[in-house]
Amino acid sequence: MPKNTGPFGPTGDYPRGKLDNTDEGGLVMGVTAYQDNVRVDFGKPVAWFAVPPEQALALASLIVKHAMAIKARRRFTDS
């Protein structure tokens, strides 16, 4: 797979080695608040992704951070 030239998508490498024959390599993804939703952007269609526990916890924390910010903004604008 070619290296990604945009902000999100494939990196063209296998940072932890190829996990199995369906592994398409590294992926840059973004997590944002978008129209009152938490949006995870992979830059391409993705069947699955795997990350070590530390990265999984960081991703979960980032998703929660954006969700909490949306909820706080809704509370502020709904009053």
Image: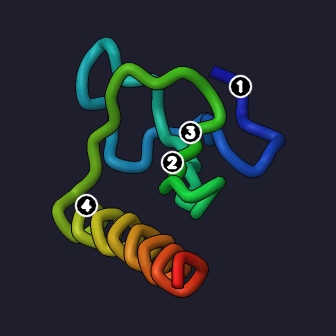
Please name which of the two marks, 2 or 4, marks the residue nearer to the observer.
2
Q: Position of residue 61 (x, y in %)?
A: 31, 74
- How is the model colour-coded? rainbow
Q: Where is residue 22 in the image (x, y as percent from the top left)?
A: 33, 14
Instruction: Give the mark, 1 or 2, whose residue is nearer the N terminus.
Output: 1
Amino acid on which disc 4 is placed: Ala
Q: Residue 40 carries which label?
A: 2
Q: Mark 4 points at which residue?
A: 56
Image: 5 above or below 21: below
Furthest toward the front, the residue is 79
SS of the residue under disc 3: loop
Q: Mark 1 points at which residue?
A: 2
SS of the residue under disc 2: strand
Instruction: Give the mark, 1 or 3, whose residue is nearer the N terminus.
Output: 1
Q: Where is residue 9 in the image (x, y as percent from the top left)?
A: 64, 38
- Is 51 or 45 nearer to us in this picture? 45
Left or right side of 38 for 33: right
Q: Mark 3 points at which residue?
A: 42
Label 3, residues with CA under 10 Å away: few <14, some 14-19, many ≥20: some
